[in-house]
């Protein structure tokens, strides 16, 4: 899995059985070299010679995915024949369900060639073809492993974008993207402090929230949309932030306001659409941002907020395990989407299989 934060690759080997939690056999994170992260970021916006740049970048990315697989196999002491399939999400460079497409780039043929393992790719397009958003896809997995017969649970993933899965007892699953997760805070801290992210939200915590700017952020049209809805860098990027009155505000106060905006997108979504949730569990890199988690918890005074660690799944690996699970669904010819979440006209077997 490599998500919208553009931080790097989360790799996992997962063993599935028909009972109990999937077992995490090995995990490995490799960060993107800065030039690759920059090229991927630039492919998120229109530019010259995109087609060639896209394919060259996809090949580079696939070689990195392959070395991540190699590290995992070494860590686990396994060889490729023990692996049923690789589920690889690819790197999103456009997500436009409104125009009927989404694009997660990498070269699945090259990855299969380099690893000698079947590769499952392009998880989102089939759901969009069936009239859905193509996202979020993780709720089906959250439902399979985190649902409870006595508590209404909400799972909140804070990656580049934040998304919620609501698992009410005896009712259909709800899931949607809330808006930004880490991506705006990451972009701003990169521009001003030349750091990849604001560790623990310390820089944001040292500033003051600008209420005028916060209100302007909330005017973003995505915020008031009702689910099913999904988003990405197409909607939330620094050019959008620059179109707001940030020039007259101290950068540290902009960071404080971005953290407050992100917390409110998540808390407001929970309050509006998951008001019956008894328990909230956080996963994704944003679970390490202590200031962000404190603000979300404060805005949700009546619920317990913990990480998925207490459910037996380390928060850093949930999304990667989810794509292993989605690949398994595809290999077993089982659906991976939840129409109640994506808005698709029915359950679909997702993706394409590239044989080893
Ligand atoms: N100690 C920390 N303090 C603050 N933020 C952190 C910390 N550790 C990680 N993060 C944030 O988490 C981000 C990475 O999160 P993650 O890998 O879940 O996102 P992603 O790659 O977009 O994933 P996905 O799209 O699968 O949800 C980093 O870019 C950073 O913003
Ligand atoms: Mg990541």
Image (cartoon, rainbow, N blue to C red):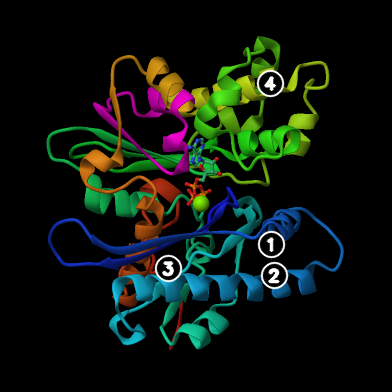
Q: Is residue 168 left or right of residue 331?
A: left
Q: Disc 4 or disc 3, which is closer to the eye?
A: 4
Asked whether 332 or 97 is in front, the reply is: 332
Q: Earlier in the sequence, mark 2 or mark 3?
A: 2
Q: Residues within 10 Å of mark 4 (few under 14, many from 20)?
A: many
Observer able to see residue 330: no
Which label is found at residue 57? 2
Please provide percent x and percent y for residue 262: 54, 28
- Residue annotated with mark 3: 350
Magenta part of the chain: 269-291
Q: Is residue 280 left or right of residue 264?
A: left
Whole-number angstrom distance, CA of label 2 to CA of label 1: 7 Å
Q: Disc 2 or disc 1, which is closer to the eye?
A: 1
Q: Earlier in the sequence, mark 3 or mark 1?
A: 1
Q: Residue at x 17, y 41 (%)?
A: 148
State yes or no: discs 2 and 1 in contact (Cβ < 8 Å): yes
Q: Residue at x 36, y 84 (%)?
A: 80
Whole-number angstrom distance, CA of label 3 to CA of label 1: 28 Å
Asked which secondary structure carries label 4, the reply is helix
Quadrant position of the C terminus in the picture: bottom left
């Amino acid at each position: 899995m490599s998500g919208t934060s553009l931080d790097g690759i989360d790799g996992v080997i997962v063993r599935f059985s028909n009972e109990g939690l999937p077992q995490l056999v090995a995990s490995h994170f490799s960060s993107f070299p800065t030039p690759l992260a920059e090229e991927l970021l630039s492919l998120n916006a229109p530019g010259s010679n995109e087609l060639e740049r896209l394919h060259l970048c996809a090949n580079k990315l696939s070689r990195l995915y392959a070395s991540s697989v190699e590290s995992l196999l070494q860590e686990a002491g396994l060889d490729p024949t023990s692996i049923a399939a690789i589920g690889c999400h690819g790197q999103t460079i456009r997500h436009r369900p409104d125009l009927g497409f989404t694009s997660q780039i990498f070269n699945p043929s090259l990855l299969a060639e380099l690893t000698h393992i079947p590769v499952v790719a392009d998880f989102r397009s089939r759901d969009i073809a069936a009239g859905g958003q193509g996202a979020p896809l993780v709720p089906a997995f959250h439902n399979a492993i985190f649902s409870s017969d006595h508590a209404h649970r909400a799972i909140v993933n804070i990656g580049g974008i934040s998304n919620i899965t609501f698992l009410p007892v005896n009712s259909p699953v709800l899931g949607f993207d809330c808006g930004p997760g880490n991506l705006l805070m990451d972009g701003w801290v990169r521009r001003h402090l030349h750091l990849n992210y604001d560790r623990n939200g310390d820089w944001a915590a040292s500033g003051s929230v600008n209420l005028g700017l916060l209100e302007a952020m909330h005017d973003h049209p995505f915020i008031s949309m009702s689910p099913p809805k999904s988003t990405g860098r197409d909607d939330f990027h620094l050019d959008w932030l620059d179109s707001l009155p940030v020039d007259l505000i101290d950068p540290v106060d902009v960071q404080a306001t971005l953290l407050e905006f992100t917390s409110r997108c998540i808390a407001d979504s929970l309050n509006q659409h998951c008001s019956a949730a008894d328990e909230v569990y956080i996963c994704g890199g944003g679970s390490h941002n202590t200031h962000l988690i404190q603000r979300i918890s404060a805005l949700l005074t009546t619920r317990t907020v913990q990480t998925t660690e207490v459910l037996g799944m380390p928060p850093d690996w949930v999304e990667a395990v989810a794509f292993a699970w989605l690949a398994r669904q595809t290999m077993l010819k089982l659906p991976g989407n939840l129409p109640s979440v994506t808005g698709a006209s029915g359950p679909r077997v997702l993706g394409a299989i590239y044989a080893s």
